[in-house]
Amino acid sequence: MIVARALALFLAWALVSAAASAEVPDANSGARLVQSHGCTGCHGAQLQGGSDGPKLAGIEKTLKAVEIAAFIKHPSEPMPDFKFTDAQIADIVAYLSGLDGGEKGDRPTVSFDPPTPTGDTRIIVHFPSPAPRRVQAVGVLQADPEAARTDAVTLTRDGVHVWSGRMSFPRPGAWIVEIMYDGNRIDAPISVASP
């Protein structure tokens, strides 16, 4: 009886542990995948729509996550099939769903001015309530993250929920701007063009 009860408790613990360790989609990983696969080439610098691809910012307001995932897993021409894993697709869906603050508008949104800079750009971050106490940003080159990083920039408050600052990029390429605030981090891809 005691052995059976101990076995039942162990099995229950194992099931709870397995459920707890199930992977949660990582929007930052999704941002890196979008940048490294050149999605901005067709969908526009801020994924606001381009010559060959539709606007992706706000897509979660018209499509469910499973529908977005289906488009990525089984793309229609001219979109290439990148053969993403289900976990990678979940990460991309998490990223795309938060581009404009998410379904409830409760996530920070990032934009750049100009959206495709040749050297430096203004970073603009809109935060929902409550606004953070401190915001910093650093750029990391996708192709060589150890060798190419920008200086850290402390953003300043431009309004109740808006923070901004200027970032200079030392060379062209596919960059990720890591924005840190109150113990959180979001990644925003940006393509830096040659001057």
Image: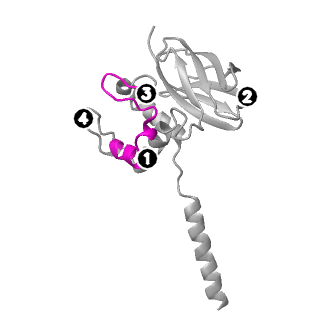
Q: Earlier in the sequence, mark 2 or mark 4?
A: 4
For mark 2, does the 10 Å Cα neighbourhood hold few (<14), some (14 to 19), or many (20 or more) residues?
A: some
Q: Gap between marks 1 and 2, in whole Å? A: 32 Å
* Residue for point 49% across, 38% down: 95
State yes or no: discs 2 and 4 in contact (Cβ < 8 Å).
no
* Span shown in magenta: 47-72
Looking at the rendered structure, which numbered label has been put on residue 134? 2
Residue on which the image places disc 4 = 77
Name the residue type under label 4: Glu
Which residue was labeled with disc 1? 65
Give the Cα distance between marks 3 and 1.
17 Å
Residue type at numbered disc 2: Arg
The tag on residue 47 is 3
| Amino acid residing under circle 1 | Ala
Does the segment drawn in magenta span residue 66? yes
Dot 2: element: loop
The answer to whether 19 is drawn above or below residue 174 in the figure is below
Query: Going from the N terminus, do you reach mark 4 or mark 1 first?
Result: 1
Q: Is residue 110 left or right of residue 82?
A: right
Q: Earlier in the sequence, mark 1 or mark 2?
A: 1
| Residue 134 visible (yes or no) | yes
Q: Position of residue 109 (x, y in %)?
A: 56, 30
Mark 4 Cα shell of 10 Å, populated few (<14), some (14-19), many (≥20)? few
Tell me the amino acid under the disc marked 3: Leu
Taking depth in this image into account, of 193 and 181 the one nearest to the observer is 181
